[in-house]
Amino acid sequence: MSETPLLRISNLEVDFPTQGGSVRAVDGVNLELYAGQTLAIVGESGSGKSTTAHAIVDLLPGAGKVTGGSIVFDGQELVGATASQLEDIRGRLIGFVPQDPMSNLNPVWSVGFQVEEAIRANGVATGKKEVRDAAIDVLRKAGLSDAEQRLKQFPHQFSGGMRQRVLIGIGLAANPKLLIADEPTSALDVTVQRTILDHLDELTREKGTSVILITHDLGLAAERAEQLVVMYRGKIVESGPSREILTNPQHPYTKRLVAAAPSLASRRLTAGLSVAEADSEFDLTAVAAKRAARTEAGDVAISLADVTKVYSIRGSGFKSTPFTAVDRVSFDIKRGTTMALVGESGSGKSTVARMLLGLEKVTSGSIVIDGQAVSKLNAKQLFALRGRMQPVFQDPYGSLDPLRNIANTIAEPLVTHHVGNRAERTARVRELLEQVSLPWSISSRYPGELSGGQRQRVAIARALALKPDIVVLDEAVSALDVLVQAQILQLLAELQSELGLTYLFITHDLAVVRVIADEVCVMNKGQIVEAGTTSRIFESPAQEYTQNLLDAIPGANIRLGA
């Protein structure tokens, strides 16, 4: 390792203007990164980790600016550098992979146009044929088959993993000395995540590229990076070798991250370990222990038998091709328990949820809820059933009306089902906010004024408004930071215990399943390939597909001490 760091950040300060002043997002950050090294920066939303990364390449959002400190890259001071100097460095010497692959690829331009644009901008190639050949090479190295044909396609024709590969390919197109990857896999399935990160490791190792990995997943960070930096409220609170921090965290905030990370909690549970010294508010092993200690469940609340869903996909001309999204799925969920339905994107799990909720019609098979066959219910009976069965979706912002305040959002089901008068509905909203640990003061606010965790609590409160028996949670915690995620999982467990709720928990994250679920059904290509108790699935999976999902949990190869 060179004695001189490739990147040295000293006393970095970043401010954002506010009404009547400014807020300091990064406060006195110091770090060093050497050639060929991978460094991970972890922390919750608002900790300053992405702001630090964006400051390096002068891509701070809004009116944010560096107000103090130094950023020296490869011997050159970047703070105060001219626009042309920074343009010469961005892309060519420092590559950048943004978080959301859909919003960072222009939907109206072909993938090839966008890759070629980056190649020309970074001086990788100039002539038309040379640029095209370079673009094909970028996609091929990014692991995309039929690269030449892919150039003609648009982002919506790519899966999330394929779009992320394109962004990684663009980031590495000019063979930069440093690659900054900002939450590059947070929206992806665990198996796709592992494939993408393995490929990124391979490419950067071949080129000797240094990497800054921004993530909120401490398990993933420790698995992928030699050095770890933990940020909290704009400051670095702990730094050092990844495994050392993971196994022996010193700062209280780092301890909370270790306790709250689902991937690490899953490893501790499987190994029979716990985190006794951690803040119990965030210890997911404690949540799982309470679930395991529950008494025997009641009768069957939900029963699916040979449920199949076939879509008609229009092909060329006027011909349609049948596509079986769900193929003879059967399972029972006992009252007051949680059934997790897991699998990769496209496995059919969300389609099962939509059929259960009555949002999709069943092609064949039966769904029975509390002894009632859903297909035989008339419109009035189905409306009543929906009052007893409520959903919580993945995106807490997209599922809430941005023009409706929180009180009206939570009261909406009460109004729709003609429950109570105005005063009674207001009292119920107050009760629900208290139930999900939110103050009454937010009732007049709008979704855009709340954090992601607060929005998801509002979504849960709305789902509970009609006092349902069944709640369908479709990736309800996958968009949240680990600490917020831990709080929501704890809240769901407490509500289930208090209200006797039955959960169908849809997720691609087996680490979360280990904490929250009593039973697990594993789906692949529309079929259930394995089912059983959570402990049995984790300790002795029978199918290779299930084992692959378990192996893909970040931190699976990290040895944890007692």
Image: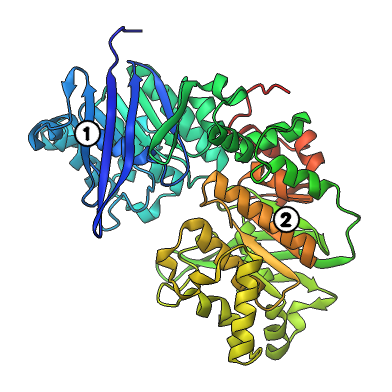
Give above or below for 388 relative to 262.
Answer: below
Q: Is residue 254 left or right of residue 545?
A: left
- Tag 2, which secondary structure? helix
The residue at 56%/45% (across/down) is 483
- Tag 1, which secondary structure? strand
Give the alpha-carbon distance from disc 1 to disc 2, as whole Å: 45 Å
Rendered image: mark on residue 68: 1
Between circles 1 and 2, the one closer to the viewer is 1
Q: Nearer the viewer, residue 63 or 467?
A: 63
Q: Is residue 414 left or right of residue 173?
A: right
**Quadrant of the frame with the C terminus:** top right
**Quadrant of the frame with the N terminus:** top left
Q: Are marks 1 and 2 in contact (CB under 8 Å)?
A: no
Residue 196 image point, x, y percent = 46, 34
Q: Is residue 135 left or right of residue 544?
A: left
Q: Nearer the viewer, residue 429 or 536?
A: 429
Residue 355 image point, x, y percent = 66, 70
The 10 Å Cα crowd at callout 1, few under 14, some 14 to 19, many 20 or more, is some
The residue under label 2 is 493
Rendered image: mark on residue 420: none
- Asked if one can make out residue 183 in the rendered structure from this viewpoint, the answer is yes
The residue at 28%/39% (across/down) is 54
Residue 380 occupies quadrant: bottom right
The 10 Å Cα crowd at callout 2, few under 14, some 14 to 19, many 20 or more, is many
Q: Is residue 483 left or right of residue 309?
A: left
Q: Earlier in the sequence, mark 1 or mark 2?
A: 1
- Asked if one can make out residue 533 in the rendered structure from this viewpoint, the answer is no
- Report the amino acid beneath label 2: Ala
- Report the amino acid beneath label 1: Gly
Residue 416 occupies quadrant: bottom right
